[in-house]
Amino acid sequence: MKQPKLFDYILLSILALIWASAFFNIKIATYSYGPVTIAFLRVFFGSLPVLLICYYKKIKIEAFTKDWHWFAMIGFINLVAPFFLIAYGIKSVQSNLAAILMSTTTLSSTVLGHFYTKNEKFNLIRTIGVLIGFSGIIYLFSDNILIDENNFFSAILILLGATCYVIGGVLTLKISKKKNENVTGSILIWASIILIPLVILIEPPLHYTPRLDSTISVIYLGLVSTGIAWLLRFRILVNNGLIFQSQVSYLIPIFGIILSYIFLKELITAKIIVSLIAVIIGIYFVRKANYKKIK
């Protein structure tokens, strides 16, 4: 991999901004749309740039081949479930909380990696990182100003959504030899297939009179935060490698808090700051352990 230059760091920051911007846009989308509809529209609009790239590069989509069950399972766990859970949860909590809660994917993947992979076992540095990071999340739940008995369950659902991303990542290892564009396009297709009947049955489209800002946000979530962000992530991975790309984990919760304050004027409490610092330190220790292993 080439040595990162200024332009590479700019692209990494843009990717972090795009992913961080998803949280306040989900909040705006919930003003008019239900969580199932938000999940479907994210998947639908997100699939457009990915499938166009596959068509342009003549990459075969294997959504309906002998491995269809893997694509369907990963589509549900990695897209349908988290998109629904996060949208449902953000409706009742501040989007900046969601940004911090979602940053636990790095910590959760470390825990699952210990049990389900051969080469990602716990060591002292990883253990310290996971303990510090999750201590920050536990501390965040003690913030009675932002999390109370009325929205506690919603915050838990967001954490569950983050865990779904991690489980989906572990399952993706089963088809890791396939091209990324093929895998992403295939799971997006299956996620759409799963969500279409759910939208019709649970949240019929004719019942909506959506606001303009909600419609813009949900289209943005699909095209930019899902589709274009994936393509940008893939470019960074190819040019600079996984270790460099993984640094986006530090930036997402920071940008998420800043953007939620700018666009929604959401409250930033002292416990949010302390929890954010703890999570970032935890991620740092986990990344440090991974980097030493690779070296």
Image (cartoon, grey):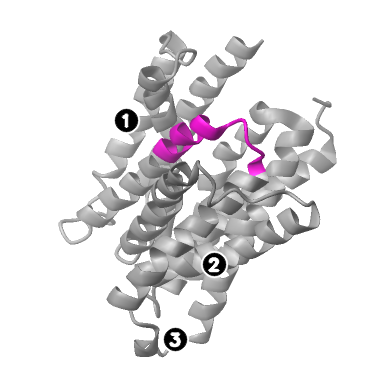
Is residue 27 among what the camera can see? Answer: no
What is the three-letter code of the residue carrying label 1?
A: Ser
Front disc: 3 or 2: 2
From this viewpoint, which residue is outermost toward the left?
Answer: 149
Name the residue beneath numbered marker 2: 44
Q: Earlier in the sequence, mark 1 or mark 3?
A: 1
Q: Is residue 57 above or below residue 129?
A: below
- Whole-Å distance between the Cαs marked 2 and 1? 37 Å
Classify residue 226 as left or right of residue 106: right
Q: Earlier in the sequence, mark 2 or mark 1?
A: 2
Inspect the magenta stretch and tell me whether residue 148 lies in it: no
Residue 27 drawn at (x, y percent): 42, 67
What is the three-letter code of the residue carrying label 3?
A: Pro
Where are the magenta residues, as a range? Answer: 166-180
Name the residue beneath numbered marker 1: 135
- Whole-Å distance between the Cαs marked 3 and 2? 18 Å
| Dots 3, 2 in contact, CB < 8 A | no
Label placed on residue 210: 3
Residue at x-position 53% and y-position 85% = 212
> The residue tagged with tag 1: helix, strand or loop?
helix
Q: Is residue 255 above or below residue 124?
A: below
Front disc: 2 or 1: 2
